[in-house]
């Protein structure tokens, strides 16, 4: 709706409300107009006024719950949804919304319970199956996640979100052929989708199809020339196919876009280290630690680089720093003690010589 038309409708509705201040439908109309205007404070103000005159209005209660959900105040959101549920326990949407709250709280059993109750009341809504699929995906149960995406797509075959998300699940299950098919279905419907273009490039990389992979990364960069993720994924692909000089250039372009994002520095450091360019690798790891001082994994990588460079004492210092950050990490401790044993044994032999 045009802005001018929207403002006129808002003014007309407010005039009507002045004449009929207890007309519930006018409140709902005004809140929907403000929602279209993305003026969320006014949406909540209108709904609050409505609940003052009609405290059992389920639509208003659900609306307030949803607005608080968007505000990330999930306790307030749940309180409104629960009140709506007491008034209308047969409304599938309320169960679905409560499921969303528990999903945000990472309470898998309760989220699943409410989603299933929503399905009991409305088994034909694909968004509920999408939500359950995402829940299983977050819990790394990709088989179940895929099954629910399939149910969602059987109800809505053109659901782009479900197609991409199911593609991602198939990718995690190493079913690259199916992932590629799903991504390409989305890309055919939306050829300007740079995220999907990158997904296709990543999939072709793992399928060892170099030219196809490169072509989709190029498409993503043609759509958005400063796409950080496209440069990162392109660099990974290039290094996978042994084109390391080009990969280094791609990482550097990513760094130019987001110079304070540590991920690119770490990946570039890994590449340098794998190429035997240890000093350059360590320089990149130190840049990561400049931006992320408590990144234990980078301390381990730096320790590995020092070890490869025969700087054992510095390696020990880096591993110790990683353990100080993550004292519960047994893998870090194992490496640390192995290097310490080696260092002590070397020193003992030097003293005996």
Image (cartoon, rainbow, N blue to C red):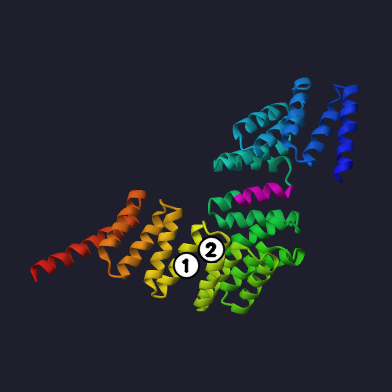
Q: Is residue 156 above or below residue 75?
A: below
How crowded pointer 1 is (Cα within 10 Å; few <14, some 14-19, many 20+) is rated as many
Which SS type dominates the magenta stretch?
helix
Residue 348's mark? none
- The quarter in which the N terminus is drawn is top right
In terms of image quadrants, where is residue 235? bottom right
Which residue is under mark 2?
Answer: 255
Q: Report whether residue 314 is seen.
A: yes
Q: Secondary structure at mark 2?
A: helix
- Residue at 29 percent of width and 57 percent of height: 317
Which residue is under mark 1?
Answer: 268
Q: Secondary structure at mark 1?
A: helix
Q: Is residue 2 above or below residue 266?
A: above
The segment highlighted magenta reads: 124-134
- The quarter in which the C terminus is drawn is bottom left
- Residue at 88 percent of width and 23 percent of height: 18
- Residue at 77 percent of width and 39 percent of height: 35
Q: Is residue 283 above or below residue 135?
A: below
Near-viewer residue (280 or 192): 280
Asked if marks 2 and 1 touch (Cβ < 8 Å), the reply is yes
**In this rendering, would 338 be left or right of 191?**
left
Near-viewer residue (103 or 344): 344
Q: Report whether residue 326 is seen.
A: no
**In this rendering, would 8 be left or right of 35?**
right
Name the spot of residue 169 as percent of width and height, x first: 60, 60
Q: Nearer the viewer, mark 2 or mark 1?
A: 2
Name the spot of residue 9 as percent of width and height, x first: 89, 36
Name the spot of residue 289 as percent of width and height, x first: 42, 56
**In this rendering, would 183 be left or right of 346?**
right
Q: Is residue 126 magenta?
A: yes
Which residue appears farthest toward the left when viewing the image?
Answer: 352
């Amino acid at each position: 709706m045009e802005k001018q038309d929207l403002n006129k409708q808002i003014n007309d509705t407010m005039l009507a409300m002045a004449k009929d201040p207890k007309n519930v439908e006018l409140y709902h109309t005004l809140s929907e107009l403000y929602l279209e205007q993305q003026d969320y404070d006014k949406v909540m103000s209108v709904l609050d006024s409505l609940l003052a005159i009609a405290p059992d209005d389920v639509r208003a209660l659900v609306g307030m719950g949803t607005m608080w959900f968007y505000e990330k105040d999930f306790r307030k959101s749940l309180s409104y949804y629960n009140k709506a549920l007491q008034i209308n326990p047969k409304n599938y949407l309320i169960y679905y919304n409560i499921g969303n709250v528990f999903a945000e709280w990472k309470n898998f059993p309760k989220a699943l319970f409410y989603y299933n109750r929503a399905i009991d009341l409305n088994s034909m809504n694909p968004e509920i199956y999408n939500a359950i699929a995402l829940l299983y995906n977050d819990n790394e149960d990709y088989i179940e996640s895929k099954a629910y995406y399939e149910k969602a797509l059987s109800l809505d075959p053109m659901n782009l979100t479900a197609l991409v998300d199911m593609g991602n699940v198939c990718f995690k299950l190493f079913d690259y052929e199916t992932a590629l098919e799903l991504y390409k279905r989305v890309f055919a419907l939306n050829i300007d989708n740079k995220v999907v273009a990158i997904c296709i490039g990543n999939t072709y990389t793992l399928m060892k199809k170099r030219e196809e992979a490169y072509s989709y990364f190029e498409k993503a960069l043609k759509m958005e020339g400063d796409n950080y993720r496209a440069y990162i994924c392109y660099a990974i692909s290039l290094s996978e196919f042994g084109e390391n000089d080009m990969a280094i250039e791609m990482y550097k372009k990513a760094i130019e876009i987001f110079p304070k994002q540590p991920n690119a520095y770490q990946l570039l450091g890994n590449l340098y280290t794998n190429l035997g360019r240890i000093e350059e690798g360590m320089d990149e790891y130190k840049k990561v630690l400049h931006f992320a001082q408590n990144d234990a994994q980078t301390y381990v990588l730096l320790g590995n680089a020092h070890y490869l460079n025969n700087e054992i004492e510095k390696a020990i210092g880096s591993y110790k720093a990683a353990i100080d950050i993550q004292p519960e990490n047994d893998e870090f401790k194992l490496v640390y003690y192995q290097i310490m044993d080696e260092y002590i044994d070397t020193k003992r032999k030097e003293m005996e010589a």
